[in-house]
């Protein structure tokens, strides 16, 4: 371990954040190596085959919060990234034959709501303006470290000044709204502003997917602000869209940028442990026993996998390991990916709907129904009336499958990681059959169109994609695990108790979603520390 380092930095995991961190470090002139356990890059941001010649975004499946700064800095458009904005942003299946659409143009969305409730149409315009204004205040925090609660002396003064500068323009009533959003429940917020259950369900469908807890639990409102952050090439608030070539095209573009700056990427190279010498990261040991030396190590793995698996206990304070072990994971999500003989028929969809509209349908329960499903998941039960978000990306992207065929990807929640009865290996296909039956209420011909399918349970997300307990965010997005609390209050600045070891994945601020923000922020923290001689 005393031999010279071959690399300035080694990144563990070629997920989109690991690749983003590597690209920024390579661009700054560092010699960087990325090590990926699987045979393909991308982590949970990948495009894979359901059956030969039929590809789809297997895990993450829609672009909404990829930071414009990351897109521009890394020149991703020049490396092949192309996104097509969705319109409507959402098509919510209220019941078979009835669909409510959230159009990109707020006035058009309000006009559609007006047919349900004139009062709610006006409330929608007011609430949408207020939410976008609050999201704009949060936006800068996504591309910088969170407030450092462990800062002392002058550093503490600097942190206070930074916070003051960010929020000095907030009015009193805006401050109370922001605090309410960070701590309050989505259900209470919607009940206060809207009278129609249909409109409330539309807002519920625009909340964070993959988050624990139902809409009447504290902190559940924050998802509305997350989805109204700026995204895409043109920094549009609330942007969402299809990625041509699937979500794997994002990670391919980031990897291409990194390689253009000398970053080396190795697939099929699982890391067994992170080496530590005299309290400082010294490289990694691979599963085949070989050692790679580096002055800096960045882990794109989640905090539990990193600190309870890759770093030996003797190198970490026991209190830190206890804090990491206490992070709430137990991912509540699953995916169903389908190869279809053709586009399915959707009840209630207008005959003149264009491909972008036809590509979306979310089957979301009522607020009370969502709460019941979340409570059932806590008991280890699988509900027979799940929250299902369907996307048919092949209607917009003809590169995914042969002409005339169709690809569908479905995100499902709330599900238990630990089942009260049986195992996920035993019940995987039962879940797939149930999901198909539920979707068929809106798409009656779907069952007969399926040529191939892949069901990913929470356990599959853990085993295949390295997401501990199947959690797509590397830790639940709740107020106790966000901002300065992520992953722990003492270590929220991407650094860790091991000098030279940084956390660059979604387990660090600002959390999950395909944003590139944790990778961006971790890389910049590395560069600041190098400049300061730390």
Image (spheres, rainbow, N blue to C red):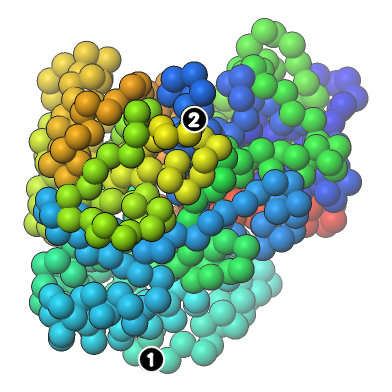
Q: Look at the numbered disc 2 and give the secondary structure of its residue.
A: loop
Sequence-first tag of 2 and 1: 1
Tag 2 residue:
402
Q: Residue at x 53, y 56 (%)?
A: 84
In this rendering, position of residue 239 left or right of residue 123 = right
Question: According to the image, label 1 marks what residue?
Answer: 172
Badge 1 crowding class, 10 Å Cα cut-off, few under 14, some 14 to 19, many 20 or more, is: few
Residue 141 sits in quarter: bottom right
Question: Is residue 211 shown to the viewer in this render?
Answer: no
| Spatial CA span between label 2 and label 1 | 56 Å
Front-most of residues 226 and 90: 90
- Which residue: 42% across, 34% down? 404
Which residue: 61% across, 76% down? 162
Q: Is residue 211 left or right of residue 310?
A: left
* Picture residue at 34% right of the left edge, 82% below the top: 107
Q: Nearer the viewer, mark 2 or mark 1?
A: 2
Residue 384 in the image, given as x and y percentages of width and height? 10, 36
Residue 445 shows in this picture = yes
Can you give x and y, in whole percent of width and height, for residue 151 in the image?
60, 63
233 on left or right of 184 = right
State yes or no: discs 2 and 1 in contact (Cβ < 8 Å).
no
- 76 is higher (above) or lower (below) than 499: below
The quarter of the rendered structure image containing the N terminus is top right
């Amino acid at each position: 371990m005393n031999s010279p380092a071959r690399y300035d930095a080694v990144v563990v995991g070629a997920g989109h954040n690991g690749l983003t961190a590597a690209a920024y470090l390579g661009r700054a002139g560092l010699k960087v190596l990325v090590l990926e356990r699987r045979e393909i890059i991308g982590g949970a941001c990948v495009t894979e085959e359901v059956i030969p010649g039929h590809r789809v975004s297997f895990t993450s499946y829609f672009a909404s919060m990829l930071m414009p700064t990351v897109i521009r800095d890394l020149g991703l458009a020049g490396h092949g990234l192309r996104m097509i904005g969705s319109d409507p942003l959402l098509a919510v299946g209220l019941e078979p034959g009835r669909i409510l659409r959230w159009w990109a143009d707020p006035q058009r969305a309000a006009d559609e709501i007006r047919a349900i409730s004139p009062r709610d149409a006006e409330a929608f315009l007011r609430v949408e303006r207020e939410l976008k204004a609050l999201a704009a205040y949060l936006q800068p925090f996504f591309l910088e470290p969170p407030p450092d609660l462990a800062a002392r002396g002058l550093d503490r003064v600097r942190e206070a000044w930074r916070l003051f500068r960010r929020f000095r323009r907030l009015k009193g009533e805006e401050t109370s709204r922001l605090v309410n959003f960070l701590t309050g429940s989505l259900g209470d917020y919607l009940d206060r502003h809207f009278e129609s259950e249909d409109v409330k369900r539309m807002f519920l469908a625009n909340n964070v997917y993959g988050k624990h807890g139902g809409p009447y639990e504290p902190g559940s409102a924050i998802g509305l602000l997350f989805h109204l952050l700026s995204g895409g090439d043109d920094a549009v608030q609330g942007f969402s869209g299809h990625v041509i070539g699937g979500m794997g095209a994002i990670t391919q573009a980031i990897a291409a940028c990194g390689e253009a700056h000398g970053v080396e990427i190795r697939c099929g190279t699982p890391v067994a442990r992170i080496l530590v010498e005299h309290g400082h990261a010294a490289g990694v040991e691979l599963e085949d026993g070989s050692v790679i030396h580096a002055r800096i190590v960045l882990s794109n793995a989640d905090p539990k996998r990193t600190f309870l698996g890759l770093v030996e206990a003797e190198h970490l304070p026991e209190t830190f390991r206890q804090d990491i072990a206490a992070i709430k994971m137990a991912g509540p999500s699953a995916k169903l990916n389908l190869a279809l003989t053709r586009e399915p028929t959707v009840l209630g969809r207008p005959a003149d709907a264009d491909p972008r509209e036809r590509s979306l349908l979310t089957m979301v329960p009522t607020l009370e129904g969502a709460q019941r499903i979340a409570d059932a998941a806590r008991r280890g039960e699988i509900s027979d009336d799940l929250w299902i978000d369907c996307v048919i990306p092949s209607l917009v992207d003809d590169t995914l499958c042969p002409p005339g065929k169709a690809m569908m990807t479905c995100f499902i929640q709330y599900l238990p990681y630990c089942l009260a009865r049986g195992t996920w290996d035993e019940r995987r296909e039962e879940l797939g059959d149930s999901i198909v039956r539920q979707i068929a209420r809106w798409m009656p011909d779907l069952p007969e169109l399926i040529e191939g399918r892949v069901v990913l349970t929470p356990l599959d997300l853990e085993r295949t994609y390295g997401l501990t307990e199947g959690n797509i965010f590397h830790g639940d997005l709740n107020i106790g695990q966000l901002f300065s609390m992520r992953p722990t209050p003492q270590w929220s600045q991407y650094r860790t108790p091991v000098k030279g070891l940084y956390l660059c994945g979604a387990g660090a601020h600002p959390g999950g979603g395909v944003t590139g923000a944790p990778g961006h922020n971790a890389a910049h923290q590395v560069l600041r520390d190098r400049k300061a001689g730390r």
